[in-house]
Image (cartoon, grey):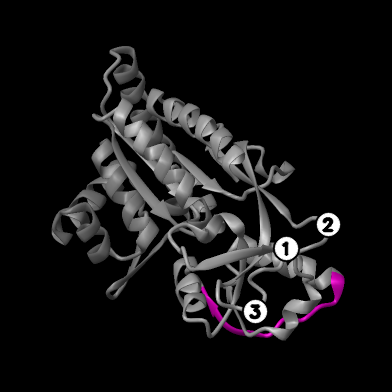
Amino acid sequence: MELRQLKYFVRAAELLNFTQAADDLYITQSTLSHQIKELETSLDILLFDRIGKRVRLTEAGETMLGYARKTIRQAEEGRQVLMDLNNLQTGKLTIGATYGLTELLIQSITAFNQEFPGVQVRIEFGSTSDLLQKIRAFEIDCMLSFLPSSPNLADLVISQLFTAHLSLILHQSHAWAKLKKVSLQKLSELPLVLPSPSYSIRNFLDGILLKKGIELNAKIEINDIHSLLELTNTKNWNTILMNSSLFDFAELTAVPIEGKNMIREATITVSSEIYQKKALLAFQDIILKKSLAYRQQN
């Protein structure tokens, strides 16, 4: 059994498509199929059921997947430990982020790159639910989101960054743009575009609406925050987001929604189950310092 074979197996198991897996791994499909067959031979059991051009995991394959991921992760951790012992300022750092934390992320990445120019940084944007899956699959090193602490998240370490306020986002030319606050009930008068239910902010908003018995006039739902802001910028619609989401939209303004429990904590989350490499610890230190300055500015 080889580490390379385990990596091939994991990607094929995730996609359940040998052609796509081979493309992702930059190898030929025949190489992928051969290596997986070699793995099955060494284990003396089938990991995939092959049904025509389709594949699916056998019971053995489903069992093996968790162990394969763990083995790959431990190998990567061992390599990172040795790099850190040698004080090598190289390697990779993969950061997941929700759109509402873009401004803080860019400030922090800029400072991080100045201090650690040899570390390659990869950024993946997504919803909180998408990023939560990725951090638990060890595909990202940390995630920036509005993920609150919870007993169901005991495998994660969640640190607070700053407070954001649920707000009505509208164009500066709108008649309500000068308001200090707006009631949630009054928002039912407006045509709205809202994040899709896959976003934690939408779940947060829906929970509040349900408790208050309020229905909003949602014309469009989109699973992309930038597109929501672009539509709001046309002056035809308005949206509801955290006030921190207005990065790079100078013509839009955020009017806080009045009431209790309209505040959310921006957080940085890491897994408690893996080795915390030096690059990650350094980035955490930088973003915590930047978030302090961000709180003072906002």
Badge 1 density bin: few <14, some 14–19, many ≥20, Cα 10 Å: few
Image coordinates for residue 250, horizontal then vertical, percent: 46, 63
Q: Which of the two discs, 1 and 3, labels the residue nearer the N terminus? A: 3
- Which residue is disc 1 drawn over? 180
Q: Which of the two discs, 2 and 3, labels the residue nearer the N terminus? A: 3
Image coordinates for residue 139, horizontal then vertical, percent: 41, 45
Whether residue 73 sits left or right of residue 288 in the image: it is left
* Residue sitting at x 24%, y 29%: 118
* Residue sitting at x 37%, y 56%: 13
Query: What amino acid type is highlighted by mark number 1?
Result: Lys
Mark 2 lies on a secondary structure that is loop
* Residue sitting at x 37%, y 33%: 111
Whole-angstrom CA distance, mark 1 to mark 3, is 12 Å
Residue 158, disc: none
Image coordinates for residue 253, horizontal then vertical, percent: 57, 65
Q: How many marks?
A: 3
Residue 260, disc: 2
Whole-angstrom CA distance, mark 2 to mark 3, is 25 Å
Residue range highlighted in magenta: 212-222
Query: What amino acid type is highlighted by mark number 2?
Result: Lys
Whether residue 174 sits left or right of residue 138 in the image: it is right
Magenta stretch holds residue 46? no
Badge 2 density bin: few <14, some 14–19, many ≥20, Cα 10 Å: few
- Which residue is disc 3 drawn over? 175
Whole-angstrom CA distance, mark 2 to mark 1, is 16 Å
